[in-house]
Structure formats: C-alpha cells, structure tokens
C-alpha cells in the first residue's frame, strides 16, 4: 500500500497535465516509508511515449534527499496514450532504478487514472494508493 497526502497526489496530477502531451516524471522522497516531498523533474527525453531523468538534475535531487536523511520512495511518471500500467521499458528500468514504488498517471482522458505498483524481478504487482 502506498499512502500519499492529497496535496502530493494533486501535485503529481498537475505535473502530468502540465507536461501533456509529453510524459512527466519525478520522485517522491520520504523517511521511514512516509512520503514527505515531491520533486518534479524534467523529462530529458521530451517524449509522449517515454521518460528519462536528466542525470545532472537527478544527482542534485538525490543529494537533496540524502542531505535531508530521506530516501527516494516513489518514481512517478505519466502515460499519455495508454492506461496507468508499467510498460516493458518501465519494467526493464525498474531492475536498476531501486525505487520501492512506481506511481503512474494516465492522462489519456479528462479524468486522470492513478495507480501504483511494486516491480520486483520483472513481476508487476498493483498496490492500493491511499490518499490521506
């Protein structure tokens, strides 16, 4: 189960809508499994079908998270033309990314679809998103 404050969910959805028709991406940091901050990142790929973190930006974000004694809990991104389900690329990237949770937002319709997953050894498991 992934628990997120409503303000964080709203921020992620707003980011996805703003970047549409390209995919958005970002990280949610936290401490002891509790989400504390959202880091909106630029999609260096600028693509409607994929995302890539800018390596310099990711290094700055990671250092900020580490300096605050937090950890990256969630990678989030949007899918602009498909449902909120991890793509084959997402599943491959998860093997090295090290994020416990994957939050996806589909912006293919007016009402965004928000779903979260764990991905371990290529196995995708949906988990509840509890908005607090």
Image: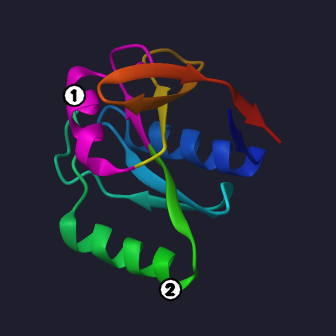
Q: Is residue 99 above or below residue 81?
A: below
The x and y percentages for residue 7 are 73, 50
Magenta span has 13? no
Helix, strand or loop at mark 2: helix
What residue range appears in magenta?
76-98
Q: Residue at x 33, y 17 (%)?
A: 81
Q: Nearer the viewer, mark 2 or mark 1?
A: 2
Residue where numbered disc 2 is placed: 67
Is 12 displayed left or right of 23 in the figure? right
The x and y percentages for residue 1 are 68, 32
Magenta span has 91? yes
In the orientation shown, which residue stands out farthest toward the right?
A: 132
Asked if one can make out residue 93 in the rendered structure from this viewpoint, the answer is: yes
Residue where numbered disc 1 is placed: 49
Q: Is residue 85 above or below residue 19?
A: above
Residues packed near mark 2 inside 10 Å, few (<14), some (14 to 19) or many (20 plus): few
Asked if one can make out residue 113 in the rendered structure from this viewpoint, the answer is: no
Most foreground residue, 97 or 37: 97
């Amino acid at each position: 189960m992934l628990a997120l404050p409503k303000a964080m969910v709203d921020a992620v959805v707003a980011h996805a809508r703003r970047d549409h028709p390209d995919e958005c991406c970002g990280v949610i940091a936290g401490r002891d499994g509790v989400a504390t901050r959202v880091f909106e990142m630029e999609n260096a790929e600028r693509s409607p079908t994929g995302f890539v973190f800018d390596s310099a930006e990711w290094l700055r974000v990671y250092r900020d998270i580490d300096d605050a004694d937090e950890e990256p809990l969630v990678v989030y991104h949007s899918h602009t033309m498909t449902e909120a389900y991890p793509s084959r690329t997402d599943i491959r990237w998860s093997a090295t990314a090290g994020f416990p949770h994957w939050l996806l937002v589909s912006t293919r319709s007016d009402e965004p679809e928000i779903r979260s997953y764990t991905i371990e050894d290529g196995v995708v498991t949906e988990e509840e998103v509890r908005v607090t």
